[in-house]
Amino acid sequence: MNIAALAELLGEINGPVIIIGNAGEVNSGHFDNLTALADLRDAHPGGAWLHVDGAFGLFAGTSPRFAHLSLGIERADSVASDAHKWLNVPYDSGFAFVRDAAILQEAFLASGEYRGGPVCLDRKSALISGALPVVVR
């Protein structure tokens, strides 16, 4: 990723943005400079969210040989990964880490006429619907 070009583009946007970085891109294995992306997020005056797609590379941080590739991932607002790629579990075992669960809950409680009311995240409703509840620690 061209960090300078992204910084220039972000300078033209007044409102909030989402910055998405890769930790192990699916075709090339490329890792974005996550520290630089977090710095851009912090500097954006309109507010920004940094999401990292760690489907292939999240677990590089567990290896002393490759840990440097994921430096800065701890500064992300959210990180998603697919456990089936490295942990030998069923194919549909994706997961996400979100720094601030309240923001996630606020987003999923949003309502609109087209939705028919807010989405309920309480444990009973999640179990009835088959969805997993949000884990807050």
Image (cartoon, grey):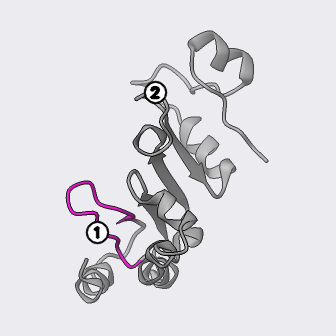
Vertical relation: 103 (above or below) 10: above
Q: Please name the residue shown 67% across and 49% down the image.
A: 101
Left/right of residue 69 with respect to residue 75 in the rendered view? left
User: Mark 1 belongs to which amino acid?
Assistant: His
**In the picture, residue 7 is in which quadrant?**
bottom left
Percent of width and height locating residue 40? 43, 82
Percent of width and height locating residue 91? 40, 29
**In the picture, residue 106 is in which quadrant?**
top right
Q: Please name the residue shown 72% across and 25% down the image.
A: 122
Nearest to N terminus: mark 2 or mark 1: 1
Percent of width and height locating residue 128? 63, 10
- Residue range in magenta is 19-33
Label 2, label 1: how far apart the Cα atoms are: 25 Å
User: Mark 2 belongs to which amino acid?
Assistant: Pro
Q: Which residue is mark 2?
A: 90
* Tally of marks: 2
Vertical relation: 119 (above or below) 34: above
Q: Main secondary structure of the magenta part?
A: loop
Percent of width and height locating residue 78? 53, 57
In what quadrant of the picture does the N terminus appear?
bottom left
Element at label 2: loop
Vertical relation: 133 (above or below) 72: above
Q: Please name the residue shown 24% across and 82% down the image.
A: 2
Q: Is residue 73 magenta?
A: no
Left/right of residue 22 with respect to residue 38 in the rendered view? left
Left/right of residue 13 with respect to residue 40 in the rendered view? left
Local packing at callout 2 (Cα closer than 10 Å; few below 14, some 14-19, many 20+) is few
> In the current view of this chain or complex, which residue is farthest to the top?
128
Q: Which residue is mark 1?
A: 30
Element at label 1: loop
